[in-house]
Image: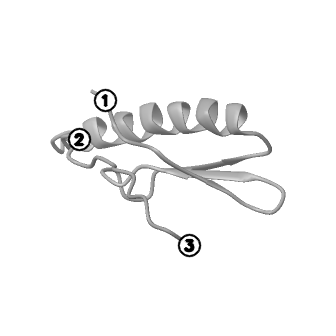
Amino acid sequence: MRYMVVIERGGSSFGAYVPDLPGCIAAGETAEEVLLLIHEAIEFHLEGIKEEGAPVPQPLSYSEFIEVEA
Protein backbone atom coordinates (compact mmCIF):
# COMPACT_ATOMS: atom_id res chain seq x y z
CA MET A 1 0.00 0.00 0.00
CA ARG A 2 1.13 3.51 -0.72
CA TYR A 3 -0.62 6.21 1.33
CA MET A 4 -0.36 9.94 0.80
CA VAL A 5 1.02 11.76 3.83
CA VAL A 6 0.47 15.47 4.42
CA ILE A 7 3.33 17.19 6.25
CA GLU A 8 2.84 20.58 7.85
CA ARG A 9 5.57 22.77 9.24
CA GLY A 10 4.73 24.54 12.48
CA GLY A 11 6.59 27.20 14.40
CA SER A 12 8.99 24.76 16.06
CA SER A 13 7.94 21.31 14.83
CA PHE A 14 6.42 19.27 12.02
CA GLY A 15 3.12 17.44 11.91
CA ALA A 16 1.93 14.72 9.56
CA TYR A 17 -1.36 12.99 8.87
CA VAL A 18 -2.80 10.46 6.43
CA PRO A 19 -6.10 11.56 4.83
CA ASP A 20 -7.10 7.97 4.04
CA LEU A 21 -6.49 6.83 7.63
CA PRO A 22 -8.44 9.19 9.93
CA GLY A 23 -6.71 9.58 13.28
CA CYS A 24 -3.32 8.48 11.96
CA ILE A 25 -1.03 11.39 12.92
CA ALA A 26 2.51 12.11 14.06
CA ALA A 27 4.59 15.06 15.23
CA GLY A 28 8.33 15.57 15.35
CA GLU A 29 11.02 18.20 15.64
CA THR A 30 12.32 17.69 12.08
CA ALA A 31 10.87 16.65 8.73
CA GLU A 32 12.97 13.49 8.84
CA GLU A 33 11.71 12.59 12.29
CA VAL A 34 8.06 13.15 11.43
CA LEU A 35 8.41 10.96 8.32
CA LEU A 36 9.84 8.13 10.41
CA LEU A 37 7.12 8.54 13.03
CA ILE A 38 4.25 8.67 10.53
CA HIS A 39 5.58 5.51 8.87
CA GLU A 40 5.44 3.77 12.25
CA ALA A 41 2.00 5.27 12.94
CA ILE A 42 0.64 3.93 9.63
CA GLU A 43 1.90 0.42 10.41
CA PHE A 44 0.42 0.57 13.92
CA HIS A 45 -2.87 1.96 12.62
CA LEU A 46 -3.19 -0.79 10.01
CA GLU A 47 -2.40 -3.46 12.61
CA GLY A 48 -5.29 -2.18 14.72
CA ILE A 49 -7.67 -2.22 11.76
CA LYS A 50 -6.69 -5.81 10.91
CA GLU A 51 -7.07 -6.93 14.54
CA GLU A 52 -10.62 -5.53 14.54
CA GLY A 53 -11.37 -7.58 11.44
CA ALA A 54 -12.16 -4.46 9.43
CA PRO A 55 -11.05 -4.07 5.82
CA VAL A 56 -7.85 -2.11 5.25
CA PRO A 57 -8.72 1.26 3.66
CA GLN A 58 -7.53 1.62 0.11
CA PRO A 59 -5.35 4.65 -0.58
CA LEU A 60 -7.53 7.06 -2.55
CA SER A 61 -6.08 10.50 -1.79
CA TYR A 62 -3.57 12.26 -4.00
CA SER A 63 -2.15 15.74 -4.18
CA GLU A 64 -1.56 18.39 -6.79
CA PHE A 65 0.18 21.73 -6.63
CA ILE A 66 -1.57 24.75 -8.10
CA GLU A 67 0.48 27.83 -8.97
CA VAL A 68 -1.07 31.26 -8.52
CA GLU A 69 0.35 34.75 -8.44
CA ALA A 70 0.43 36.14 -4.94
8 left or right, relative to 20: right
User: What is the residue that sits farthest to the right in this orientation?
Assistant: 12
Residue at disc 3, secondary structure:
loop
Quick check: marks 2 and 1 in contact, CB under 8 Å? yes
Q: Is residue 5 left or right of 52 when viewed as pictured? A: right
Nearer the observer, 44 or 42: 42
To which residue does mark 1 refer? 2
Which of 67 and 16 lies nearest the eye of the viewer? 67
- Outermost residue on the front side: it is 69
Q: Quadrant of residue 67?
A: bottom left
Residue 6 position within the rendered picture, expressed as x and y whole percent measured from the top left: 48, 50
Q: Is residue 26 above or below residue 37?
A: below
Residue of label 2: 59
Q: Which residue is pictured at 26% across the width and 49% down the height?
A: 61
Tell me the amino acid under the disc marked 1: Arg
Q: Could you say whether the residue bearing mark 2 is in a helix, strand or loop?
A: loop
The local crowd at label 3, few if under 14, some if 14 to 19, many if 20 or more residues have their Cα within 10 Å, is few
Towards the viewer: 51 or 37: 37
Work out whether mark 3 precedes mark 1 in sequence or the reverse, and give the earlier one.
1
| Circle 3 residue | 70
User: Residue furthest toward the bottom?
Assistant: 70
> Which kind of residue does numbered mark 3 sit on?
Ala
Position in image of residue 64 (x %, y %): 33, 50
C-alpha distance separating marks 3 and 1: 33 Å
Q: For the N terminus, which image quadrant?
A: top left
Q: Quadrant of residue 56?
A: top left
Q: Is residue 35 above or below residue 61?
A: above
Earlier sequence position, callout 2 versus callout 1? 1
